[in-house]
Amino acid sequence: MPNRMPQADDEEIALPPPVVSTPVQRHLHGQAAPWQCDQVAAEVPVALVCNGLSHAVMMCTPQDLAELALGFALSEGIIDRAQDCYGIDIVAVDAAASSDWATAGANECSLPALAVHLDIASSAFMRLKERRRSLAGRTGCGLCGIDSLQAHDWLPQPARAAPPPWLAQIGPATIFKALAAMAEQQTLNHATGALHAAAYADVHGQLHAIYEDVGRHNALDKLLGARAKALQSGTRRDGPGWPQQGFVVMSSRASYELVRKCARLHLPLLATISAPTSLAIRVAEIAGLQLWGLAREPRAVRYTR
């Protein structure tokens, strides 16, 4: 997806790049090198707005935002299917325009931000308003902004499904192959060393898509959104397309929320390079999702039966 989006009047606006240059000075063994430019990952506030109602603000890498928005809407249960999203528009804003800096007269202070507007079905919007909660930056535990324990959707919906027969073909060797390919294709992380990745592999460990972001939840939502769009339209991305039989690999630990997102979109296996939490294992057991962690060749740990 190009890093530019048209406004309503068809005038193009430039979106922030996913990687920016900044001066750095490296220190090694007590010696300081001359200042020089280095690349760092861009991180910008992104507001997700559904039918004019601001629902969530996340810190994201400003790339593949339409996929991020669709994946978030699906994995968080805002919409039930990709067809319930009628359109996505992205606009650039200045997040500092209404801040104390601006009112203090610091006109030189600006904070690039983006607003992603989703046009969703009225039934989905009514449901969203009924259970609306304020979310602020779901880059950590994923619970920021909820007002009670009962307000959080802890378990995946729908509930446990029978594992597909083809799942038995996937073992450590397949997972290692997918993770190795993912590491090779993390172009933004190679430049900055600061981004997570989520990738989709088939039963042979062949990668078919990879998405990167500073937040592991965002990277997964981008992947899930792209997959939903591809399955809906039957289109292909980067040649080989998106096979129905596949699984997700990620460059992060397995938090319960990543498990819940995969289960909601009927992905039966998640493998990560770091360990899961106890809650992630419990949610995977309830959902019937096969969870692998600490998958670094030659070792991999399977946490659910």
Image (tube, rainbow, N blue to C red):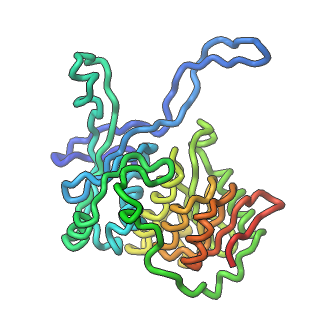
Q: Position of residue 59 (x, y in %)?
A: 42, 43
Give the answer, above or below, for where 273 lies relative to 20.
below
Query: Residue 133 or 211: which is nearer the viewer?
Result: 133
Lateral position of residue 148 relative to residue 254, left or right = left
Q: Quadrant of residue 28?
A: top right
Q: Position of residue 75 (x, y in %)?
A: 42, 66
Q: Position of residue 57 (x, y in %)?
A: 35, 47
Q: Can residue 178 be seen here?
A: yes
Residue furthest to the right: 298
Q: Can residue 86 be seen here?
A: no
Residue at image position (71%, 17%) is: 27
Lateral position of residue 49 relative to residue 192, left or right = left
Give the answer, above or below, for where 169 lies relative to 90.
below
Residue at image position (69%, 73%) is: 204
Query: Residue 227 or 299: which is nearer the viewer?
Result: 299
Q: Position of residue 215 (x, y in %)?
A: 51, 48
Lateral position of residue 96 relative to residue 285, left or right = left
Query: Residue 178 or 144: which is nearer the viewer?
Result: 144
Residue at image position (31%, 52%) is: 134
